[in-house]
Image (cartoon, rainbow, N blue to C red):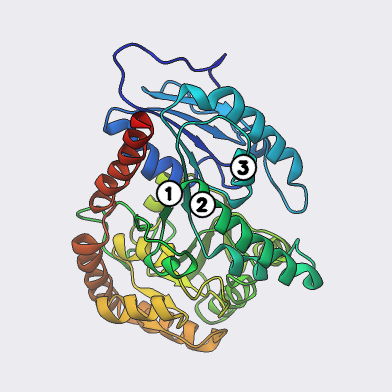
Amino acid sequence: MTGGDPARAPGTGRRALVVTVVHHPHDARIRHRQIPALLAAGWQVTYAAPWGDYDLAPDAAVPGLTAVEVRRARGRHRLAAQRSARELLRRLGPDHDVVLLHDPELVPTTVGLRLPPVVWDVHEDTAAAVSVRPWVPDRLRPVVARAVSGVERLAERRMALLLADEHYAARFRSEHPVVLNTTTVPADPPPAATTDADGALRVVYLGSVTVERGARELAAIGRRLRAVAGDRVVLQVVGPAHGEAEEVLRTARDEGALRWEGFVASDRALAMLGGALAGLSPLHDTANFRPSVPTKIVEYMAWGIPVVSTPLPLATSLVERSGGGVLVPFGDVDRTVEQLLAWADDPALAREVGRRGHDYALARLDWSTQAPAFVAALQQVADAGARS
């Protein structure tokens, strides 16, 4: 962490204060896509994230980037993080041209503060997400969902919005810029179905793990693969687990049913996809997932590995348009394992399916096509603030 408050340096371009109290400091969209896009465009960026609460050392020695500490919002313990963020916004906000918020709980922290223009980056259907938050009691979920809808209305009145998916537009009254949650697509990733140093074919899951994201299915898939294929095909789970999913994965790992890597920074995690037999997206049919393209599917396609996904509406559309994978019924472990073993027996077919997905991602889903729109949206907000 750099010491003291960041100060405006003579001759620099615009300054952005980027704040999250919920996301991991190395969140792919925030730290590995949006911030580098701003830095490459000549912006100075102050990045406030809960580094210490994740046992991380803040980024240092990145030209143009200043990392500062803020408390983490976790489970039902969120007020301390909101107070920490409000104090940080009060202290540092005026030194910047724009403030970029990444969490809905940050919206009300701006009320009553003298700040430059504020942007909220809407990552998900926020009200629907309440239905899968394990820390919200069942009886309170309708109340919390209504409160979140109120936050969304407040945000639309008081600040600019960015949407991570065009399907979120229905939640708001006005039109707002859409910056899709895509990824960087390598031009020539390793071919799918390449054995690792142990001679195994890896099936991967990338991303946070919860029960609703398929934790129990992952454990069952790992066990079935081990029983049928032994060490020839292994399941590798790359990402942190939350709630009940943590014990589910820990038990499966201790049994030897899967490899669980825990959280891995985005750049290294994505590279781990290269050469895998397939990528899994076993998300459940919940309101939170229906209006979004699962980012993991885009990442699997970017790295040229076949996708096995449940038939959520937008996942279905993407898999069918690209030809980059197959769809399996929700919770269908048997069908998933059957497909994985078929590709293990025919690696040339797996590579062809992966190649089709990669070709589609390279043409339509590369972050390089979204980065200019993201920078332009913040520039427009900053310019409007400077004129007011």
**Classed neighbour count for the residue bearing mark 1: other residues with Cα under 10 Å, few (<14), some (14–19), many (≥20):** some
Mark 1, residue position: 29
Q: Secondary structure at mark 3?
A: loop
Question: Would you place residue 196 above or below residue 232 in this image?
Answer: above
Label 1 SS: helix
Report helix, strand or loop for mark 2.
helix
Q: Position of residue 203 (x, y in %)?
A: 45, 68
Q: Nearer the viewer, residue 1 or 323?
A: 1
- Name the residue beneath numbered marker 2: 157
Which residue is situated farthest in the front direction here?
A: 388
Under mark 1, the amino acid is: Arg
Residue assigned mark 3: 21
State which quadrant residue 187 falls in: bottom left
Name the amino acid type tagged 2.
Arg
Residue visible at 71% across and 49% down?
Answer: 74
Q: How much space separates mark 2 and mark 1, taking CA atoms?
A: 25 Å
